[in-house]
Image (cartoon, grey):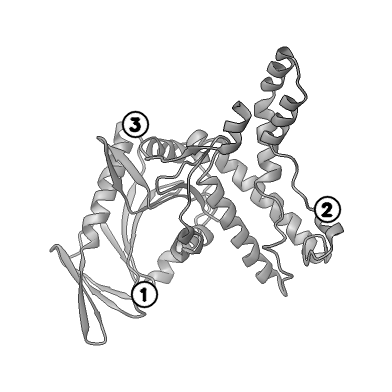
């Protein structure tokens, strides 16, 4: 499952530490999948069909870092004792994120009838978990549009590709005081993919040209749409300029993609990849079969792009109360 490192203009944990969180995500995913798979094979009722209050007690979350801090404050410790507790803040935070942010959710797991059904339920829970990491930190939080929880395209990018792929979904970049929304950017260990996706009715035909507008045809009906080449070129140009600033050398691929339609673009530029119904499966399998581990240059590229990401967030209410 690919990692969502930036979602629109939301605050992201990956912005805080791009080296720590990718490896943590992989570790937590593996750890919790082994746990839920074992629960399935042993028919553990504490995970599936939680109807008994006594069973629900078993699954309660451990206290969060904030709760622990409040407990410390409420005990009216001396100032010296309180300062001592701050020294172990980082250790507590790491442990709490492991325990809290990726716990078994009884509302998500209905008793599956097969291991494949279990995987799907697990991936769906993991999707919600990723949205949390891509919209909040320990002290800050962004308001997530409800529609993103049902965004099939976002799920497609995250659930279909390897853990080593780092995804910036509809990222908003801040350049010269101007916010610019880019196409989806996927940073793999060996290259960067800028992807503009065209979705319409099944088997629709997109007629491309070097003009400002393309034409979509379906059942003798035609409709104009703004050329996706404009958007994908803008995305590639901005990504390339940021990488060059930090002297990061990674190939950049530009893709116009339609999973269920056709693209007729005879004069397509040599550096533009067209992926449509006839060659989609080949491209898709090539992406899925990417086995390279996460690389340092990949993390540097991600860090450089995240530095230019626009972030709109607010301070967590719990922290304001703790300060008071």
Q: Mark 1 packing: few (<14 Cα in 10 Å), some, or many (20+)?
A: some
For residue 269, which quarter of the picture? bottom left
Question: Does residue 266 appear in the picture of this structure?
Answer: no
Q: Which residue is mark 1?
A: 277
> Residue 173, labelled with which disc?
none
**What residue is disc 3 on?**
246
The local secondary structure at tag 3 comes to loop
Q: Give me the residue at 66% from left, 26% from top.
A: 89
Disc 1/disc 2 C-alpha distance (Å): 48 Å
**Percent x, y of residue 86:** 67, 21
Q: Pointer 2: what residue? A: 58
Q: Secondary structure at mark 1?
A: loop
In the picture as drawn, the residue positioned furthest to the bottom comes out as 219
The answer to whether the residue labelled 2 contacts the one labelled 3, judged by CB atoms less than 8 Å apart, is: no
- Given contact means CB atoms under 8 Å apart, are the residues at marks 1 and 3 in contact? no
Point out the frontmost of discs 1 and 2: 2
Note whether residue 223 is visible.
yes
Query: Where does the image place residue 167, in percent across and percent down from the top left?
Result: 45, 50
Q: Nearer the viewer, residue 173 or 17?
A: 173
Estimate how packed mark 2 is, as few (under 14), some (14 to 19) or many (20 or more) residues with alpha carbons within 10 Å.
Answer: few
């Amino acid at each position: 499952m690919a990692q969502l490192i930036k979602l629109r203009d939301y605050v992201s944990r990956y912005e805080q530490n791009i080296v720590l969180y990718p490896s943590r995500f992989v570790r937590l995913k593996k750890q919790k999948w082994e746990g839920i798979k074992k629960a399935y094979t042993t028919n553990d009722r504490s995970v599936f069909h939680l109807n008994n209050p006594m069973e629900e007690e078993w699954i309660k979350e451990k206290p969060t870092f904030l709760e622990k801090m409040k407990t410390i404050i409420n005990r009216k410790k001396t100032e010296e004792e309180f300062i001592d507790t701050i020294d172990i803040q980082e250790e507590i935070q790491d442990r709490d994120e492991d325990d809290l942010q990726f716990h078994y959710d009884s509302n998500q797991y209905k008793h599956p009838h097969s291991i494949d059904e279990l995987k799907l339920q697990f991936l769906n829970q993991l999707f919600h978990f990723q949205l949390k990491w891509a919209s909040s930190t320990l002290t800050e939080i962004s308001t997530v549009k409800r529609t993103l929880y049902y965004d099939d395209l976002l799920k497609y990018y995250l659930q279909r590709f390897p853990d080593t792929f780092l995804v910036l979904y509809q990222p908003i970049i801040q350049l010269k005081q101007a916010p610019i929304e880019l196409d989806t950017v996927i940073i793999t260990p060996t290259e960067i993919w800028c992807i503009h996706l065209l979705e319409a009715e099944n088997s629709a035909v997109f007629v491309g040209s070097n003009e400002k507008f393309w034409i979509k045809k379906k059942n003798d009906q035609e409709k104009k749409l703004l050329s996706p080449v404009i958007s994908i070129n803008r995305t590639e140009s901005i990504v390339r300029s940021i990488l060059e600033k930090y002297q990061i050398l990674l190939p950049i691929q530009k893709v116009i993609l339609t999973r269920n339609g056709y693209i007729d673009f005879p004069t397509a530029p040599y550096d533009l990849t067209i992926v449509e119904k006839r060659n989609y499966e080949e491209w898709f399998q090539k992406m899925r079969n990417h086995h390279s581990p996460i690389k340092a240059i990949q993390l540097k590229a991600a860090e450089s792009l995240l530095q230019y990401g626009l972030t709109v967030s607010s301070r967590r209410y719990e922290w304001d109360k703790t300060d008071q």
